[in-house]
Image (cartoon, rainbow, N blue to C red):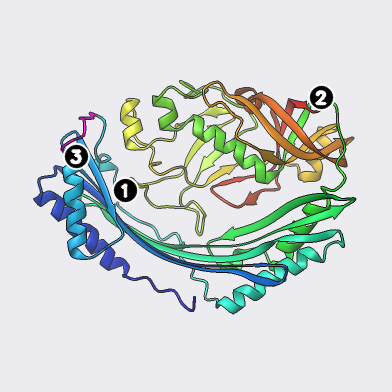
Amino acid sequence: MAKSAFSYTLDEIKQMSQDVLKTAKNLGASAAEVDVSLSIGQNVSVRLAETETIEYNRDKVMSVTVYFGQQKGSASTSDLSTQALKDTVAAACNIAKYTAKDAFCGLADAELMAKNIPDLDLHHPWQISVDEAINIAKEIEAAAMAVDKRIANSEGASVSMGESSFAYSNSHGFTGGYASSRHGMSCAVIAEENDAMQRDYWYSTARTAVDLESALVIGRKAGERAVRRLNPRKISTCQVPVLFEAPLASGLISSLVSAISGGSLYRKSSFLLDSLGKQIASPLLNIVEDPHIKKGLASSPFDNEGVATAQRQLVRDGVLQGYVLGSYSARKLGMQTTGNAGGNHNLLVQSGELDFAGLLKQMGTGLLVTELLGHGMNMVTGDYSRGAAGFWVENGVILHPVEEITIASNMAEMLKSIVAVGNDVLVQGSKQVGSILIERMTVAAE
């Protein structure tokens, strides 16, 4: 992809969204909202130094939701011609006539719309040719293969770049939109010894290419992680401290967020029902949501309903300070939206003083988890049981890899049993958190 080039300018898709609103009004809709989005991207992958795939994408879509009082209809199209847009609005209006009335549907409240929209520096096109991307991917893979002669095979390395632009409008008179980018590099290799094989990977993602980890670092980490998993040993079933490596610790935070999100709450399918203002976790857990971090992977000046976003404390000293709500779920709960239609924004988990080595030392004897398998959590009860792999640790020192084990507990208990959060923070998504040490879990093995 030689240069960044959307099919339409931001002003053009803003105008398009406003035209759609006018069409909806002319067809009798009492309210409407519309999103017009464009995306372009390029991805290349290599395997064993040979180019495997070259992919391009160029997508566009308009989605509209109309309201006739308490009746709602939605439709979308990838054809942005004037007639196609009109036909799509008409289809949404027709759908609305056949839907049941829902007292909780509708636009977010007008007074909550974003007034001042800050520039969060989210758009950084990566001007890179296919040949350059292929060379970088080969460099990543070569760095991984060079780590150890036991790395005998590769699942490949990839380099991707993507840009998007969107405009959102609703009949409150709100129109907003911006362009953003997201680029990434990754590698997965296979180490082999004594007819046994182990696989591992590493990746980096960022808004701008200069913030990505280098090709050599990504490859080296992928190679080192694969080799260190060779020759796993069996362990006996036990109850021990468990340290979740930073890439997996974000999953614990994701489970917490799911449990305090609107859909789970109003359906009464969460183990954290009615927890607002209550102690839900260890006093060591502090989480801030900050939607306005420059170049943040989950930054946004407004949510999917045009509601202004703002920094807030989600958890303070283990006490839940707020839920994660869009306007629909908020109304179902008799509350106000928190500006989270579409999901959470950057969640920053406060780190402790210990680095990764310090966490191992504090744990003493226990399990370091570096891979989780399956989706073994019951959101209603909090019961947690997942296949895992990692390393056995004694006296703060990693002794050997382990696999074919299951770790089990209850998420409510796990949150309250957090005894340390490391400062080895990894930024790979919407949750920024270091490794998390849980005081005790059941490790089922032989």
Magenta-tinted stretch: 97-103
Characterize the magenta stretch by its predominant secondary structure: loop
Q: Which mark sits nearer the N-terminus, 1 or 2?
A: 2
Kind of residue indicated by mark 2: Thr
- In this image, 343 relative to 14: left or right? right
Kind of residue indicated by mark 3: Ala
Compared to residue 240, the image places residue 196 above or below, namely: below
Q: Which mark sits nearer the N-terminus, 3 or 1?
A: 3
Q: Residue at x 17, y 45 (%)?
A: 93
Tell me the mark number nearer the camera, choosing from 1 and 2.
Answer: 2
- Residue under label 2: 237
Q: Residue at x 15, y 35 (%)?
A: 69
Residue at far front of view:
195
Mark 1 Cα-neighbour bin, 10 Å: few <14, some 14–19, many ≥20: many
Instruction: Kindly state the secondary structure of the residue where label 3 is placed.
Output: helix
Compared to residue 437, the image places residue 291 above or below, namely: below
Mark 3 Cα-neighbour bin, 10 Å: few <14, some 14–19, many ≥20: many
* Cα distance in 3D space between marks 3 and 1: 22 Å
Residue 350 visible at all: no
Quadrant in which residue 53 is drawn = bottom right
- Disc on res. 96: 3
In this orientation, which residue lies closer to the viewer: 287 or 74? Answer: 74
Q: Residue at x 80, y 28 (%)?
A: 445
Tell me the mark number nearer the camera, choosing from 3 and 1.
Answer: 3
- Disc on res. 306: 1
In this orientation, which residue lies closer to the viewer: 181 or 84? Answer: 84
Q: Position of residue 5 (x, y in %)?
A: 40, 74
* Cα distance in 3D space between marks 1 and 2: 51 Å
Q: Position of residue 358 (x, y in %)?
A: 80, 41
Q: Position of residue 392 (x, y in %)?
A: 84, 37
